[in-house]
Image (cartoon, helix red, strand yellow):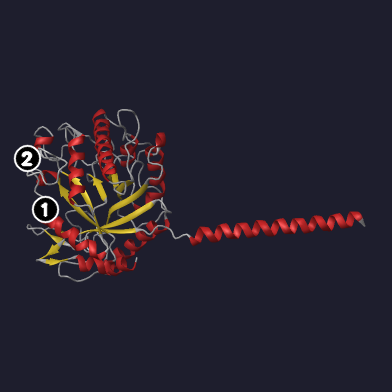
Amino acid sequence: MPDLARQRAGLRRLRLVGTLVLTTLACVISATFAQPAAALQKAIWGPVQVGGVSQFPIYQDLGVDLFQYTVPWDGVAPTQPANPTDPNDPAYRWPAELDQAVAEATPRGIRVLAMVMRTPAWANGGQPEVAPPTDPQQYAMFLEALAKRYPAIRHFMIWGEPIRNTNYLVNGGAAPNYYIKGQKKPTALPKVSPLQRSQAAGYARLVDASYGRLKALNRANLIIGGNTTTSGDIDPFNWFKYLRLPNGKPPRMDLFGHNPFGTRGPDLKKEQILIGTADMSDLDVFIPWVKKYLSRSGRNPRIRLFISEYTAPTDIAGFEFPYHVTRPLQAKWLTAAMNIGKRSKDIYGLGWIGLYDTVRADGQESRTGLIDAKGVRKPAYYAFRRS
């Protein structure tokens, strides 16, 4: 009998322990799912106004969180300011359109993101505007002045697609991609030339200098660095691999920007399109690489991805993209891309380019918009609003 009593007591203890474990596990799971995940930030590129009419009621209808705007440094500061961190320096010519964007966005709960590029000749030794500044601090001081003039702006993008020589050119020379289209599919990352390393290192200093000044001004400022696209004159995987400061550390940033354009619908089950490149379907491979190379030495431990630009052109191949899809398929791709963003804790936001289809003076078109040139809203407009 004593043995039987001990066995029964042991079973009771096991049942009690099991109940406690299950209860604890249920509480943990409940708490985990009760915590709302950070909402995916919906961003867009588009005009401030059309024909004198503000477009912000449309952005509000779409549920836009971030309105993205390019600030041309060379246009705002055509001559060198005596006090570069003072937004009231007489050399600065702040765009009235940006004033309007901030004024229109703020009461609607929309935030403005500023992407700064194009170097004035006085800051890069008289080189073309796509050449970076000789001193990264000159660029960083301009960003400080920008942040002081527009305290409502909290998102700052450091250049756009610097892996393309048409956007960011070092020492007047091109940094060619070693992979030639049409050749045998590579089995390893393309080689990196000394000029490419110089390009990545110079950009790293630009990002880090900007981070230092903007964070000193306001810790709430978010710095978006990297800003790659699917492929370029330097492959994106090599780009963040060689983004290094003189001390060997990666530059400080809050978000890594990427524009994952592609000719296939977003689906993470698909294989990587090409080693070294990354479209929307490759983000499951891309994000771990970003974390691996940009979180070294304790830097950027919470870095996340910001998709600044994604699109699917409709109807015809235009001057921007040599492919197109149907209008219903554009909406389907947009929804799939948004779903990838919403399901990932590592993606901060997703931006669409742009609001309208565009027609150039020479008649060439780019039909990436949510609204066509006649003002008709495409199915993707409603997909973006629902997402």
Which residue is label 1 attached to? 95
Is 234 located above or below residue 311 in the figure? above
Residue at the spot 7% in from the left edge and 57% down from the top edge: 362
Compared with 113, 164 (above or below) is above
The residue nearer to you, when weighing 364 against 341, is 341
Residue 287 x %, y %: 39, 46
The residue lying at 16 percent from left, 49 percent from top is 71
| Label 2 neighbour load within 10 Å: few <14, some 14-19, many 20+ | some
For marks 2 and 1, give the CA distance: 15 Å
Q: Residues within 10 Å of mark 1 (few under 14, many from 20)?
A: few
Indicate the quadrant where residue 321 lies.
bottom left
Q: Amino acid at mark 2?
A: Thr
* Image position of 133 with respect to 230: above or below: above
Query: Is residue 283 left or right of 108 when viewed as pictured?
Result: right
Depicted 5 relative to depicted 93: above or below: below
Label 2 belongs to which residue?
79
Residue type highlighted by circle 1: Pro
x and y percent of residue 185 in the render?
34, 41
Label 1: state its secondary structure: loop
Which quadrant does the N terminus fall into?
bottom right
Whether residue 83 appears in this view of the structure is yes
- Horizontal side, residue 114 vs residue 37: left or right: left
**Element under disc 2:** loop
